[in-house]
Image: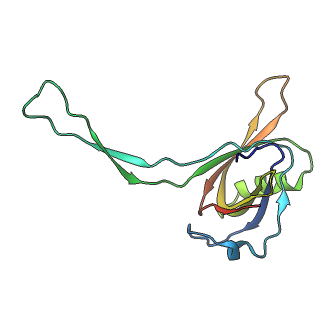
C-alpha cells in the first residue's frame, strides 16, 4: 500500500512552553485545538541523518593502498521538515505559523493523509521564508521545522 500527499491536510496546534524534547504518546495531544494551515502545496520530507565518525588505520603490509574507513554512527540530530504554503491573506493557520516562528517555544503539529492516517509531533518553527521563485508561480511561505519529539503515527 502507498500513500499520496494530495488530499493531505496540515494543522498547527498548541504552544508547548517549557517543553523538553522527548517521546510523545496520544495523551500528549488529547486537548489540542487544531488550526488548519491553508494553501499547503508541499509537505517536503521529514529527515534527519545520523552523524558519523570515520576511523581508518594505515595497513602496515600495504602502505600504498589506504584502508577502507570504518564508519560508525555517532549522534542523531533532531529531524527537520520543510512545509510550503501559498500565501493566503487572513489565513489563521498561516498567521499561527508566523507567530510560532517568532517565539522560542515549540508547538504541536498534525498531518492527516488522504487515507485518514495521522502523524502528530512537536516542533520548533525555525524559519518563515518568502518564496518568490518564478513570475508565473504563486508567492508562498516556506516554513522550516525542527522536530522536538518522535512522530506519533496512527493508522486510518
Q: How many marks are shown on the rendered structure?
A: 0
In depth, the one of 14 and 44 nearer the eye is: 44
Pick the front one: 63 or 12: 63
Q: Is residue 16 above or below residue 141?
A: below
Residue at the image position 56 percent from the left and 52 percent from the top = 79
Q: Could you tell whether 29 is left or right of 146 in the image?
A: right
Q: Relative to residue 43, is residue 76 drawn left or right?
A: left
Estimate the x, y position of residue 102 in percent, counting from the top left: 71, 56
Instruction: Identify the colour scheme used.
Output: rainbow
As drawn, is 40 to the left or to the right of 107?
Answer: right
| 139 up-or-down from 73: above or below | above
Question: Residue 35: which quarter of the image?
Answer: bottom right
In the foreground, 142 or 154: 154
Q: Please tell me which residue lies in front, 67 or 80.
A: 67
- Residue at (83%, 27%) from the top-left corner? 137
Percent from the top left, x then y, of residue 56? 22, 40
The furthest residue to the front: 1
The residue shown at (79%, 71%) is 32
Q: Name above or below for residue 64 compared with residue 60.
A: above
Quarter of the figure with residue 36: bottom right
Q: Residue 128 placed where, x, y %? A: 72, 46
Residue 156 in the image, given as x and y percentages of width and height: 77, 61
- Which residue does the image show at 14% across and 35% down from the upper left? 58
Amino acid at each position: 500500500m502507498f500513500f499520496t500527499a494530495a488530499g493531505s491536510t496540515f494543522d498547527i496546534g498548541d504552544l508547548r512552553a517549557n517543553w523538553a524534547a522527548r517521546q510523545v504518546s496520544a495523551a500528549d495531544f488529547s486537548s489540542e485545538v487544531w488550526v488548519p494551515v491553508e494553501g499547503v502545496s508541499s509537505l517536503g520530507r521529514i529527515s534527519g541523518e545520523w552523524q558519523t565518525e570515520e576511523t581508518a588505520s594505515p595497513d602496515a603490509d600495504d602502505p600504498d593502498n589506504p584502508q577502507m574507513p570504518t564508519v560508525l554512527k555517532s549522534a542523531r540530530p533532531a529531524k527537520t521538515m520543510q512545509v510550503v504554503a501559498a500565501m493566503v491573506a487572513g489565513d489563521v493557520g498561516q498567521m499561527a505559523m508566523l507567530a510560532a516562528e517568532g517565539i522560542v517555544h515549540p508547538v504541536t503539529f498534525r498531518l492527516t493523509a488522504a487515507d485518514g492516517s495521522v502523524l502528530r509531533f512537536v516542533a520548533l518553527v525555525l524559519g518563515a521564508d518568502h518564496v518568490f521563485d518564478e513570475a508565473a508561480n504563486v508567492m508562498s511561505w516556506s516554513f522550516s521545522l525542527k522536530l522536538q519529539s518522535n512522530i506519533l503515527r496512527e493508522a486510518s
